[in-house]
Image (spheres, rainbow, N blue to C red):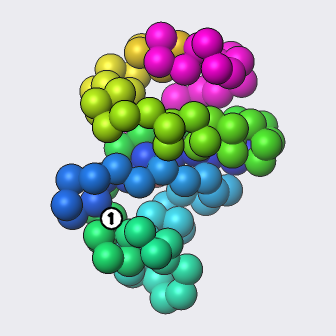
Amino acid sequence: MYYTYMLRCSDNSIYTGITTDVQRRFDEHAGRLPGKCARYTGSRQAVKIEAVWSSESRETASRLEYYIKKLPKAKKEELIALPESFAKNLGGKLDVSAYELVNCSCI
């Protein structure tokens, strides 16, 4: 299982990435684990997991990451605030049935 995630950073920016372990990756971004912090989150500490989608393969997770990164910030904020906007914002670009929203509080 692969996950595409969106993190809120200390400067209110949004970082998007993929992983097989969301909590471990968040801890790396937040500086709680040594080593593998992304350059972006190294200078803007991650403070919160905002949204997570699961998918069956690295390829589908990477495809979602690509399209989310291309969205303007307002659309990223919409994905976070209104998860039901997922199909509206990304449905024309990829098969939205390949992704399932994950409850962030469970992570």
> What quarter of the picture does the N terminus occupy?
top right
Query: Considering depth in this image, is 44 or 32 the residue closer to the camera?
Result: 44
- Give above or below for 27 relative to 23: below
Q: Which residues are magenta?
A: 88-105
Instruction: Give left or right: position of 15 versus 95.
Output: left
Where is residue 39 shown, x and y percent of the image? Answer: 46, 75
Residues packed near mark 1 inside 10 Å, few (<14), some (14 to 19) or many (20 plus): many
Where is residue 13 shown, x and y percent of the image? Answer: 28, 53
- At 67% across and 56% down in the image, what residue appears? 20
- At 28% across and 59% down in the image, what residue appears? 9
Quickly name the residue at label 1.
46
Where is residue 66 shown, x and y percent of the image? Answer: 61, 42
Where is residue 46 shown, x and y percent of the image? Answer: 33, 64
> Does the magenta portion include 93?
yes
- Give above or below for 5 relative to 30: above
Residue extending furthest toward the bottom: 34
- At 57% across and 34% down in the image, what residue appears? 67
- Give above or below for 104 relative to 22: above
- At 42% across and 14% down in the image, what residue appears? 84
Query: Considering depth in this image, is 64 or 81 the residue closer to the camera?
Result: 64
Residue extending furthest toward the left: 11
Q: Which amino acid type is shown beneath numbered disc 1?
A: Ala
